[in-house]
Every structure is written in C-alpha cells, then in structure tokens.
Amino acid sequence: MILVTGGAGFIGANFILDWIGTNGEPVVNLDKLTYAGNLGNLASIDGDARHVFVRGDIGDRAQVGALLARHRPRAVLNFAAETHVDRSILGPAAFVETNVVATFALLDTVRGWWAELPASEKAQFRFIHVSTDEVYGSLGTADPAFSETTPYAPNSPYAASKAASDHLVRAYCHTYGLPTLTTNCSNNYGPRQFPEKLVPLMIVNALAGKPLPVYGDGANVRDWLYVGDHCAALRAVLAHGRAGETYNVGGGAEVANIEVVRMVCRMLAEARPGPDYMAQIAFVKDRPGHDRRYAIDAAKIRRELGWSPAESFESGMRRTLQWYLDNPGWLAGVTSGEYKKWISLNYAASAA
Ligand code: NAD
Ligand code: TYD
C-alpha cells in the first residue's frame, strides 16, 4: 500500500481517485482537514476498503510513526501543504509551520522508520515530495523555461517555504540515503480545486454575477496543467523515477491570466448563455511581489519516463468547467463560512 498525505485537498484527492481507479492498490490518506481539505472530494470512494482516511498532522511524529508501523507503505507521497500565495502574504507563519517544520518532522519520522526496514524493502521504498515550479522565481519574457538545474529563487513566502522543504528532501537523500524524488509542477487546474485559486474563483464568481478580479495588468503568465495529467506524472515518477532525482512537470501551455479569464467567460457563454460574463472582468490592485512568468521545461520527464500531458489547455478547461457546472452541491459546501471571510479579507485588501 501507499501513504498519501494531504489527500483531501485538490491534487491529493484527484490523485487518490485516479490511483484507486487505475491501480487499485490500497491508500492510507493522512490529512489534517484544514480549510483546504474536504472529504467531499472523495465522496465517490466512500466506503471503499482500499481507501483508509486518517485525520492528522504530518508534523505529529507519534501519529505518523504509528501509521508507518501499522501499514508498512512501500511509498509515501507528500501533498500536504499550505498552498495559496495570497494567504502566504497575509499570514506567512502557517506556511513555515506546515511546509517547513511539519514537513521536516514527516521526513525525519519516515527516515527513522525506513532505516530499520529489511534491506530489500529499504531499497524499494520511495518518498515522493510534490512541489512547485514557484521555487524557481520569475521569468522574463525571453528567458528559457525552468529546467531541473535552474537555481532556486523563491519570491513569495509560499514559494520560500516549499523551497525549504525541497532542500530538506534533497539533504535526506544525500545524507541518509532515503530514496526521495521531488516533482516541481506548474499551475494545476481541474475538478475539486478550492475556489480561492484563479480558475475556480473565476468560474464561481462568473456564475454568481460577481466581479472577476484580475490582478495588475493581467499579463502575468502561468504554465497550466490539467490535474489528471499531474496525477499521471506522479504515477510515472513513482513507478520509474530515479531515486534522488527531481522532475519538472508542466503542460507547455503558457497563458496570460487575462486570457484564462476570457476563456472562462467564452466557455460559460456557450454553456450558460445570458449574462455578459466579460463585463464582469475587473482589474484590481496587483499582488505584492507578483511573479511575472512561469514556464516549465518538461523534457526530462518526457524523455526518461515517457510522460506527456493528455489534455490541451482548451480541452482541460472544458472538462473543468463542466465539472463545476455539474457539481453545484460541492461548490455550495465549500463556499460558506471561512471561505466568505477569506474573500472579503483578500479582495478588500486588493481593491483597485
Ligand atoms: P490544497 O491546498 O488543495 O490541499 C492541501 C491539503 O493538505 C489539504 O487537504 C489540507 O487539509 C492538507 N494539509 C495541510 N496541512 C497539513 C498538515 N500539517 N498535515 C496533514 N495535512 C495537511 O493543495 P493542492 O493544490 O492540492 O496542492 C498539493 C501539493 O501540490 C502541495 O504540496 C502544493 O505545493 C503542490 N503543488 C500545487 C500546485 C497547484 O497548482 N495547486 C502546483 C504545483 C505543486
Ligand atoms: P493562483 O491561482 O493564486 O496561483 P499562483 O499564484 O500559485 O500562480 O494565481 C494564478 C495567477 O492568477 C497569478 O498570476 C495571480 C492571478 N490571480 C488573479 O489575477 N486574480 C485572482 O483573484 C487570483 C486568485 C489570482
């Protein structure tokens, strides 16, 4: 079996659904259920014996140690993190606590347990650390895309905290021989993404007749990847990746934010005609320290592991939009209480 952390969040939940659907090997899912964790993401495998959910913190050494001893996973995939750049600007402490301190405790607990395993299990074990391209900083228009050898230059507290965890993961492989692999992936979008991030926020606001807040001039570029393609990349890295290596994962789909928002408006106008969605676009104050451009050179994972994305940005966005239209109950469940507080806090601060 495998141990997934953060499996009630956006990518972790998509990974577990994908894993149970394609592989069927049992998964233990350790998640703290922060505001971003949602067991409703896993409703379709409710009662499936191959998924064991455990509420807990990756920083809790006793709990993680007990889970490892009981389940003896052949791999740990670490998705658990604080993940939203804007939140990291308004409250960086939680990012250091989870992404640095708690991730260190997870890594160290896994190392202690792994060190006592019989030699063959030790050699086969894998620790996959799911990280981000934001650790590389920001690109100019003409710069080459991020490769695995691009120097780290994190700009936001979120990116800095992920960079710190990447360094610890690297050191645990180099120093103790723990078989770790790190993936640095570009912006994901798809079903079950919490509507604080660009794509789902635009869908939710557009449907509600609210403003579509575009930071700055809207020309910041992200390299978008459909979440299902990220899950496939992680399966490939687990199956065939070389321990100690890092792999950049990206869709080769560089799009400016304003174009992403316009695409949402165009697709919604087809699916739910009536409102003038484009008229809802509102340029607001820029995010402090806003990275201008991210782009991933995914040549290594393509070459070594034969991975490539199945979805284009257009096809992935269509699937995503349809999922949100088909799942109003999911949306209603995540857009109450704490969510409303966040929206008023962040967008009051960023009003133009
Ligand atoms: P998310 O915010 O949707 O989910 C994070 C999950 O981690 C939640 O379920 C939360 O409850 C859980 N969690 C937080 N702190 C925890 C703790 N201390 N112990 C246990 N569980 C905890 O995040 P996501 O978008 O699914 O991202 C998952 C991972 O992928 C992160 O490590 C992130 O840095 C990385 N990543 C995300 C993107 C993206 O575009 N979303 C891109 C590249 C990499
Ligand atoms: P986001 O989804 O927060 O991901 P990240 O900051 O990790 O790339 O934001 C994606 C891009 O969209 C980023 O350039 C910031 C921008 N953005 C807006 O313009 N308006 C918004 O309301 C949000 C949430 C993001």
Image (cartoon, rainbow, N blue to C red):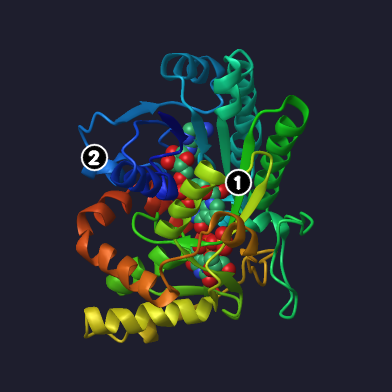
157 or 340: which is nearer to us?
157
* SS at mark 2 in the image: helix
Q: Relative to 43, does residue 231 appear above or below in the rendering?
A: below
Relative image position of residue 117 (x, y in whole percent): 57, 15
Measured in 3D between alpha carbons, the distance from the residue under mark 2 to the one under mark 1, in whole angstroms, is 34 Å
> On residue 91, which mark appears?
1
Q: Relative to 309, does residue 312 appear above or below in the rendering?
A: below
Local packing at callout 1 (Cα closer than 10 Å; few below 14, some 14-19, many 20+) is few
Relative image position of residue 240 (x, y in whole percent): 54, 45
19 or 39: which is nearer to us?
19
**111 lies left or right of 33:** right
Question: Which mark is nearer the camera, 2 or 1?
Answer: 2
336 or 264: which is nearer to us?
264
Q: Amino acid at mark 2?
A: Ile
* SS at mark 1 in the image: loop
Residue 210: tell me if it is visible. no
> On residue 45, which mark appears?
2
Does the residue tagged 2 have its C-beta within 8 Å of any atom of ligand 1?
Answer: no
Q: Relative to 322, does residue 64 appear above or below in the rendering?
A: above
Residue 165: tell me if it is visible. yes
User: What quarter of the picture does the C terminus occupy?
Assistant: bottom right
Q: Earlier in the sequence, mark 2 or mark 1?
A: 2
